[in-house]
Image (tube, coloured by chain):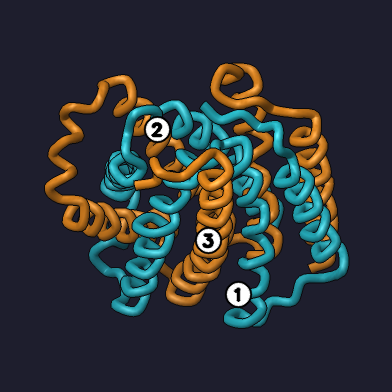
Chain colours: A orange, B cyan
Amino acid sequence: MWNNLDRDGKFLLGTVLAFLSAILYGISQVIAKKGVTEYGVPPVVFLFVALFFATVLMFISGWPGIKSIRYFPRKQVLLLAGAGLTSGLSVTLLVSALDRAPVVVVTPIVALNPIVSLTLIYFFLRRLERVTKRVVLGTGIALSGAIFVIIGSTDL
Amino acid sequence: MSSGIIFASLALCGFGCSTFLVRIGLIGVIPRMAATISVASSCLLLLALVTIFYPKELVSIEPVGFLWALAYGIVTFSLARVILYTAFGLAGATRVAPILSVMPIFAAIFAMIILGEKPNFLIIMGIILSVLGMILILGDRNIDVE
């Protein structure tokens, strides 16, 4: 669908979609907080219900394209399944964290996950993407922001 | 509070690893299909956890709580994750992953509006620094994406 776009166009659209995704993730933090704390749903149960219906919805909306998954390279499927497992575990931890601390403390910490991914990309994916000094500096500043949030959280 | 910070820190590591795996896994795969595989495998993990630890709670879940979980599933997995994977495919993880740093701003805004939470001065400073860091990253034109 995006093949007609040039490099800058892809970067721009990718950036806009990333912001949209960030907004949706921001909203989801509040939804999780509301569901888990106000209605007493255990975080893991809350997540399972959410994931179950999301999976069903994605299979229905993606059909019949879903059938083509069997033709995907096995390595890619395993990597994506691994990403799903890691992500599932992380979301469980995130919702558990939201059950124990305010949203304004938890989300800035979790938002620093690019530090981990950029480190891994720097060491293992140099042929795909370049981690520049500016990216490292920007990530460092974001990390210092998280430290402020953690210190500030002790006053809450 | 401290256990919440520990859990959040572990989640931060997990999300970072997940992004890395997605970036490799997306090569040659349609983002929507990639998101479906990822969400389905997350679901299987949670199914195992719920079956082992929370079988009674799953049956006795309140209808309102159930609806909130449904809303969370649609917003987080059916929408946000698909959009995020598409963004990864277009602009690369080096650019897209740091953009997610603005998430706290939106979370804080929605938390203030819906939950009535009030962030203090240090928290606001921390969020501003996170945004500044992101601006630096976004301004970098030398990130290659293959």
Residue nearest the viewer, comparing A138 with B105: A138
Dot 1 falls on a residue whose secondary structure is helix
Question: Which mark is nearer the camera, 1 or 3?
Answer: 3
Separation of residues labelled 1 and 3 (CA atoms): 15 Å
Identify the residue at image location x=76%, y=51%: B135
Which quarter shows the C terminus of chain A? bottom right
Q: Is residue B37 above or below residue A54?
A: above
Callout 3 environment at 10 Å: few (<14), some (14 to 19), or many (20+)?
A: many
Pointer 2 local density, CA inside 10 Å: few below 14, some 14–19, many at least 20:
many
Task: State which chain disc 2 sits on.
Answer: B
Label 3 resides on the chain identified as A
Q: Position of residue A92 (x, y in %)?
A: 46, 49
Q: Which amino acid, mark 3?
A: Leu
Q: Judge whether A147 appears above or below A106 on screen.
A: above
> What x and y, as percent, mark residue B131?
76, 55
Dots 1 and 3: beta carbons under 8 Å? no
Q: What is the distance, in whole Å, between disc 3 and disc 2 at their CAs?
A: 20 Å
**Labelled disc at residue B110:** 1
Q: Nearer the viewer, mark 1 or mark 2?
A: 2
- Point out residue A75 in the picture as x, y percentages from the top left corner: 32, 20
User: Which amino acid lies under the numbered mark 2 shown in the image of this protein?
Assistant: Leu
| Disc 1/disc 2 C-alpha distance (Å) | 31 Å
Q: Secondary structure at mark 2?
A: loop
Residue under numbered circle 3: A20
